[in-house]
Amino acid sequence: MEEKRKSRRMSLTAQLLIKNMDGAAAKEEEVEIDVLDVSKTGVGFICDTPLAIGAVYDAFLKIWTEEVIHVFLKVVRIEQTEEERYICGTIFIGLTELDARRIEVYDLMTSIKEEEKA
């Protein structure tokens, strides 16, 4: 998938549970996904369920501090893998300033650790 983000990507060991918020009757089905990366602008993940480009999902992101952040994600890219899974690129919709700062702090800490290794 071609890189389109302006913010640096960060890998986290986390999962999301999402519910489709599109349409009058929002589905209550929760879908487990594997997070590939997070930046202050969005989340990349893999899931087994095909999602719709442009759809907005209610999500709960478990971050590195073990806190759970409630976010809304809009799907902007989907790529199907040979294993019949879906790599999705999403952007945050209405991310609070506090939660954006949490992600920025993690990014700063990760950058410092990488510089120390070099």
Image (cartoon, rainbow, N blue to C red):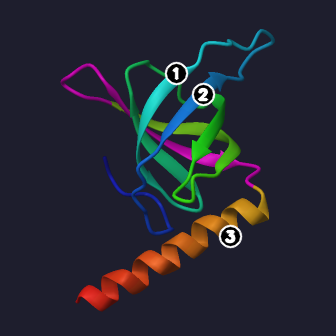
Q: Give residue 101's mark.
A: 3
Residue found 46% across the figure and 45% down from its top: 14
Q: CA distance from mark 3 to mark 2?
A: 22 Å
Q: CA distance from mark 3 to mark 1?
A: 27 Å
Pointer 2 residue: 18
Instruction: From the viewer's side, name the closer residue of 80 and 59.
Output: 59
Q: Residues within 10 Å of mark 2 (few under 14, many from 20)?
A: many
Please tell me which of labels 3 and 2 falls first in the chain. Answer: 2
Q: How far across and how far down the image is residue 48, in percent? A: 37, 20
For the record, the magenta segment spans 80-95
Q: Give residue 31's mark.
A: 1
Q: Do residues under tags 1 and 2 come within 8 Å of each other at their CB atoms?
A: yes
Q: How far across and how far down the image is residue 13, in percent? A: 41, 49
Label 1: element kind: strand
Q: Is residue 30 above or below residue 106?
A: above
Q: Quadrant of residue 40?
A: bottom right
Residue found 37% across the figure and 82% down from its top: 113
Q: Do residues under tags 3 and 2 come within 8 Å of each other at their CB atoms?
A: no
Q: Amino acid at mark 3?
A: Arg
Whether 94 is among the magenta residues is yes
Please tell me which of labels 1 and 2 falls first in the chain. Answer: 2
Label 2: element kind: strand
Number of numbered discs visible in the structure rendering: 3
